[in-house]
Structure formats: structure tokens, C-alpha cells
Image: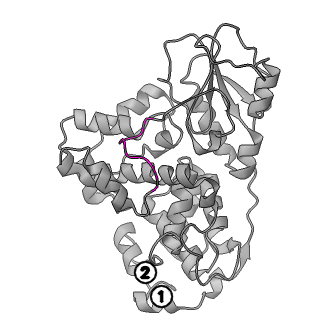
């Protein structure tokens, strides 16, 4: 479903229709880009995508919705940068009306009785992708009707998402659950029918919003469980490090083939078991990541901790700050323990820091566009 060759990924950008995206994105067959897995894995950046679209001649004011949706990704990441591990718990206020810390089994088994949801979950296990509206529907059913705390079902979804970005995922779930927003998000059967082209009636969501917001958890959602989420990492040997060349650290969030591509370097894809214990992903996601990493010539995989790599490569305790032997990596909240030279990510805008709402953030970003 998703190409992994870099030239094919870049070719897809030429076919984006950001005007149609703004008009149809909420529909299950909307003209979405399907580039999110490559943004999440750091193969391309939001800034690169924006520049390509603008260079194609699209006027910012006519594609503002498209640009906004890209900006949401950077917004969530900026919150992670500012708040760190605090995004793993209720950020603004406690989620209300919670009666379990697991997740409804019916969602994971695709037997909720909501046909559009169940079909999407079955496809999800096969292709690792969910339309954004479906993600919101699932979160609403799990948290606001099933009354699960958002954290466990959010981790289940992240585990299977090829475009999994923990900031976007966790904070979006909190937005739906009302712990990172002013109110909970609900969808009824009429809404699902409209955007998923279904015609279902008689489900527990076939009611007006006032009734749904007050309803008891239906029987189908009362059985909950704790999903087992483990990441199968490849076994590797310590890569030989050539002296006189810098070490470039790639990871699950940075697989950019263009990063320093013209300099001789030791290129290491670092897979830290500690990271994947904290944020597990499926074997399919690891396979996808490895396939994407093949776009980087000379890249070698090392499964181990950063300190292990430094120790076993003979770099532990050394300054290693000169261009010939430096250790380079891109900024990310999960890289705080790295040592070396941190380089900024390719953000869409120069707006940095924490903003309590997206539109406060967007107001600043918008000034950098000629709209």
C-alpha cells in the first residue's frame, strides 16, 4: 500500500491536489496525500512538502486547510518538545467519566457492530493505516462511550500505525477524550454514514448527540482488556566505525536520505530497546522502517542503547566534536540522552514553543505565509 523507494515517494508529491484535499479530506475516500508515514519516519519533512506544493504554483490562501493540517503535526511535536513525558498523562485536565484503564475488546476484535469501524479496523491490521476520521471515531467510542482512559487504546493504535507519531497520536486522543480540549468529541451513526458512505441504522450510535453524550456504556463495549504490545527488534552486531569520519545517528523518527548525504560518514540506524519498551510498535512497522532505511546508502543497523554504541565503538567519554569525528543527530524529544551535535529538524515555520491551542500557534505561523 505504501511505497518504500525514495524516488517513488518523491514522485507522489507531484500528484498532490491540495485544493481537493481541503474539500474532500473528511470523507473516507477523500483526496488525502497518504504521505503521513514518510513524514512520521522523517523521510520527508512538513517544510519540504509545503515548499514543493507552493513551488507548484498553489496560492497559500486557496490551500490553507491543507497547510493547516500539516501545521497540526508540527504543533503536536512542539508540545512534546515543550512538555516532554507529560504528554503521556492527562495534559490540561483529568479525563472525566473514566471507569477502566484498559480498552474495549470489541474495538480490537473489530466486533463493535458499527460496520464502518469494524471494516476499518480489520483493514488496519493488514495495511497499518486509518483515515483520520476513523481514528477520531475509534477514540470517541473507546474513551467517551466505552469510558476507557485514553492512554491504553492510544498505545494500541500507535502500535499498529505505519505513520505512528506519539505526539500526534497521544495528544489527538486526549483532544477527543477532553483532557486536552474544552469538551469531549462525539460522533453519531449519521455522521459515520455520511463520511464513510454507509447506510447503517439501529446501532448504539444511532441517536442524537445529547443522548449519546449521556448514554450508559453499551454491553458490546463493557468487556475490556490490556493489549500485549511488544516490538520484535532485529539482532545485530556492533558496526565497525571508521576513524576520521563522523557518526550520523538515524532512528525511528529520522530516516532522511538527504541528510548530509554528500559527506563520508558512519551512518548508523540506532534501535534502542528502551525506546521501544516505552513506545512499542508492531513487527510490520519495523519491517517498514527497515525498508525505508535502504534509501540511505551505507546505513548499518545497530540494536542497542546509545551508550552501548558509544562504548563499543570507542567513542565513550570522548569529546568527538570536530567535523571529522563528531556525532550528529536530529533533535527529537526522545533523543535527549544522546551526546554530540544536535541539529534542528526541518520545521514548517519558525514558530517555536508551547501554545495552549492550535489556533494560537497557527496565528503566528500564518504570518509567515503571504495569505
Q: In the image, is residue 239 above or below residue 188? A: above
* Residue 360 picture location, percent across and down: 35, 60
Q: Residue at x 42, y 80 (%)?
A: 189
Q: In the image, is residue 323 above or below residue 142? A: above
- Separation (CA) of disc 2 from disc 1: 7 Å
What mark, if any, has residue 42 been given in the picture? none
Is 353 magenta? The answer is yes
- Mark earlier in primary sequence (2, 1): 2
Q: Is residue 1 visible?
A: no
For the residues labelled 2 and 1, say whether their Cβ atoms are less than 8 Å apart. Answer: yes
Neighbourhood count class around disc 2 (C-alpha, 10 Å): few under 14, some 14–19, many 20 upward: many
Q: Is residue 358 left or right of residue 341?
A: left
* Residue 300 picture location, percent across and down: 68, 22
* Residue 49 picture location, percent across and down: 35, 38
Q: Residue at x 27, y 38 (%)?
A: 53
Q: Give the residue at the far top of this rendering.
A: 244
Q: Residue at x 49, y 28 (%)?
A: 5
Q: Which residue is mark 2?
A: 188
Q: In the image, is residue 263 above or below residue 178? A: above
Q: Is residue 73 visible?
A: yes
SS class, disc 1: helix
Q: Which residues are magenta?
A: 346-354
Along the line of sight, which residue is nearer the eye, 202 or 180?
A: 180
Quarter occupied by residue 289: top right
Is 337 magenta? The answer is no
SS class, disc 2: loop
Q: Is residue 355 left or right of residue 141?
A: left
Q: Main secondary structure of the magenta part?
A: loop
Neighbourhood count class around disc 1 (C-alpha, 10 Å): few under 14, some 14–19, many 20 upward: some
Quarter occupied by residue 359: bottom left
Quarter occupied by residue 274: top right
Q: Which residue is mark 1?
A: 212
Amino acid at each position: 500500500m505504501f511505497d518504500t523507494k525514495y524516488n517513488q515517494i518523491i514522485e507522489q508529491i507531484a500528484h498532490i491536489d491540495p485544493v481537493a484535499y481541503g474539500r474532500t479530506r473528511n470523507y473516507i475516500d477523500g483526496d488525502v496525500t497518504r504521505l503521513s508515514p514518510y513524514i512520521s519516519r522523517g523521510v520527508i519533512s512538513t517544510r519540504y512538502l509545503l515548499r514543493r506544493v507552493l513551488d507548484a504554483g498553489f496560492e497559500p490562501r486557496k490551500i490553507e486547510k491543507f497547510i493547516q493540517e500539516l501545521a497540526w503535526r508540527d504543533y503536536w511535536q512542539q508540545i512534546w518538545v515543550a512538555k516532554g513525558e507529560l504528554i503521556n498523562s492527562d495534559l490540561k485536565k483529568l479525563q472525566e467519566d473514566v471507569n477502566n484503564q484498559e480498552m474495549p475488546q470489541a474495538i480490537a476484535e473489530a466486533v463493535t457492530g458499527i460496520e464502518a469501524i469494524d471494516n476499518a479496523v480489520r483493514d488496519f491490521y493488514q495495511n497499518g493505516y486509518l483515515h483520520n476520521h476513523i481514528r477520531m471515531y475509534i477514540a470517541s467510542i473507546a474513551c467517551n462511550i466505552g469510558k476507557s482512559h485514553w492512554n491504553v487504546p492510544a498505545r494500541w493504535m500507535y502500535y499498529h500505525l505505519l505513520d505512528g507519531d506519539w505526539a500526534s497520536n497521544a495528544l489527538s486522543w486526549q483532544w477527543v477524550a477532553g483532557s486536552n480540549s474544552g469538551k469531549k468529541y462525539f460522533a453519531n451513526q449519521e455522521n459515520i454514514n455520511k463520511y464513510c458512505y454507509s447506510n447503517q441504522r439501529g446501532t448504539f450510535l444511532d441517536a442524537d448527540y445529547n443522548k449519546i453524550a449521556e448514554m450508559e456504556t453499551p454491553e458490546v463495549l463493557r468487556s475490556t482488556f490490556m493489549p500485549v504490545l511488544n516490538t520484535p527488534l532485529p539482532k545485530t552486531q556492533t558496526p565497525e566505525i571508521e576513524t576520521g569520519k563522523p557518526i550520523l545517528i538515524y532512528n525511528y523518527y529520522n530516516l532522511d536520505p538527504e541528510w548530509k548525504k554528500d559527506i563520508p560518514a558512519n551512518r548508523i540506524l540506532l534501535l534502542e530497546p528502551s525506546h521501544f519498551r516505552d513506545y512499542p510498535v508492531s513487527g510490520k512497522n519495523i519491517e517498514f522502517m527497515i525498508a525505508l532505511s535502504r534509501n540511505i546508502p551505507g546505513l548499518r543497523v545497530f540494536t542497542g542503547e546509545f551508550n552501548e554504541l558509544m562504548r563499543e565503538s570507542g567513542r565513550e567519554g570522548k569529546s568527538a566534536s570536530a567535523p571529522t569525528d563528531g556525532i550528529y543527530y536530529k533533535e527529537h524529544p526522545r533523543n535527549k540522552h544522546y551526546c554530540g551535535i544536535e541539529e534542528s529538524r526541518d520545521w514548517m515555520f519558525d514558530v517555536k514553543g508551547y501554545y495552549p491551542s492550535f489556533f494560537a500557534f497557527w496565528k503566528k505561523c500564518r504570518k509567515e505565509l503571504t495569505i
